Image (cartoon, rainbow, N blue to C red):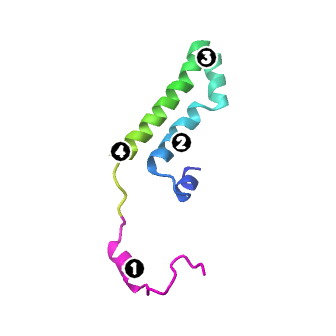
Amino acid sequence: MVTGLKKQGANNGAALSFMIATPESGVDSIAVSWAMLDPVMTIVRPIAGFITAVSTGIVENYFGQKEYPKNTEQQECQIQSCKPDETISGST
């Protein structure tokens, strides 16, 4: 699921937030919290999961490692070999 989000253009912070928030806010997780904990903790747990997910995503976006291309020489060759009249996207 996260790889699909990344392919559609989501950044690392958004993907990481999704990975953290999804198991915390699921119906099954809330039901188990209701059975094992008191009602107050059943309400606090998804809220804390949401706050943790959002703050982790923000920290990743600001302080995470930037992704650099692995082979810059190959990309430069591809860029230089394009002619000005060619369309890169393939649309006409």
Q: Earlier in the sequence, mark 3 or mark 1?
A: 3
What residue sits right under mark 2 in the picture?
18
Task: Give the Cα distance between marks 2 and 1.
Answer: 34 Å
**Spot occupied by residue 14 in the image (x, y as percentages of width and height):** 49, 45
What residue sits right under mark 1 in the picture?
79
Any magenta on residue 67?
no
Q: Earlier in the sequence, mark 2 or mark 4?
A: 2
- Amino acid type at mark 2: Phe
- Amino acid type at mark 3: Met
Please give the label number shown on residue 36: 3
Examine the rendered structure and indicate whether residue 86 appears above or below residue 5: below
**Quadrant of the image occupied by residue 74:** bottom left
Name the residue rendered at 47%, 44% in the picture. 16
Task: Give the Cα distance between marks 4 and 1.
Answer: 29 Å
Report if the CB atoms under discs 3 and 1 are less than 8 Å apart.
no
What residue sits right under mark 4 in the picture?
62
- Amino acid type at mark 1: Ile
